[in-house]
Amino acid sequence: MFGAAVLLAVAIAIEVGATAVLPRAEGFTHPGWSAVVVGGYAVSIWLLTLIVRTLPVSVTYAIWSGVGTAFVAVVGYFFLGESMGWVKALSLVLIVAGGIGLNLVSVAHA
């Protein structure tokens, strides 16, 4: 299970990195940046296929998408000049809390 958690963290980091450089692809008109985006997403999804051998797909996807969404918003705020109001911040906390809740329910039923 520890190995799956590490792979999940790596998958999230790769997906966040690919999403962070998405604006540089400029509608996939820049081949290099487009390759980084598509390659990052492909590696992240491939890692998910390995992770779901150990963890339930519902929990894996909820954590991957929720934490990824939150991290992309943080990267957007700190590095891409995007805004962060209290509603956006609270919404991100709720997304992460939902992922944690799903994980807790999954562990309780294991």
Image (cartoon, grey):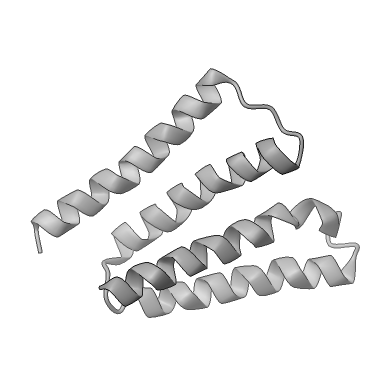
Q: Residue at x 27, y 76 (%)?
A: 54
Q: Is residue 79 visible?
A: yes
Q: Residue at x 25, y 73 (%)?
A: 1
Question: Is 56 rendered above or below residue 78?
Answer: below
In the picture, measured across the screen, residue 56 lies left or right of residue 8, that is left
Location of residue 65 in the rendering, given as x and y in whole percent from the top left corner: 47, 53
Instruction: Give the quarter of the image for residue 85.
Output: top right
The residue nearer to you, when weighing 81 against 30, is 81
User: Residue furthest toward the right?
Assistant: 29
In the picture, measured across the screen, residue 79 lies left or right of residue 100, that is right
The residue nearer to you, when weighing 36 against 74, is 74
User: Residue furthest toward the left?
Assistant: 109
In the picture, measured across the screen, residue 57 lies left or right of residue 44, that is left
In the picture, measured across the screen, residue 25 lies left or right of residue 8, that is right
Total marks drawn? 0
Instruction: Give the quarter of the image for residue 4.
Output: bottom left
Location of residue 35 in the rendering, given as x and y in whole percent from the top left corner: 78, 73
> Where is the C terminus found, in terms of image quarters?
bottom left
Q: Is residue 27 visible?
A: no
Location of residue 71 in the rendering, given as x and y in whole percent from the top left corner: 55, 47
Q: Residue at x 86, y 71 (%)?
A: 32
Q: Residue at x 55, y 62 (%)?
A: 13
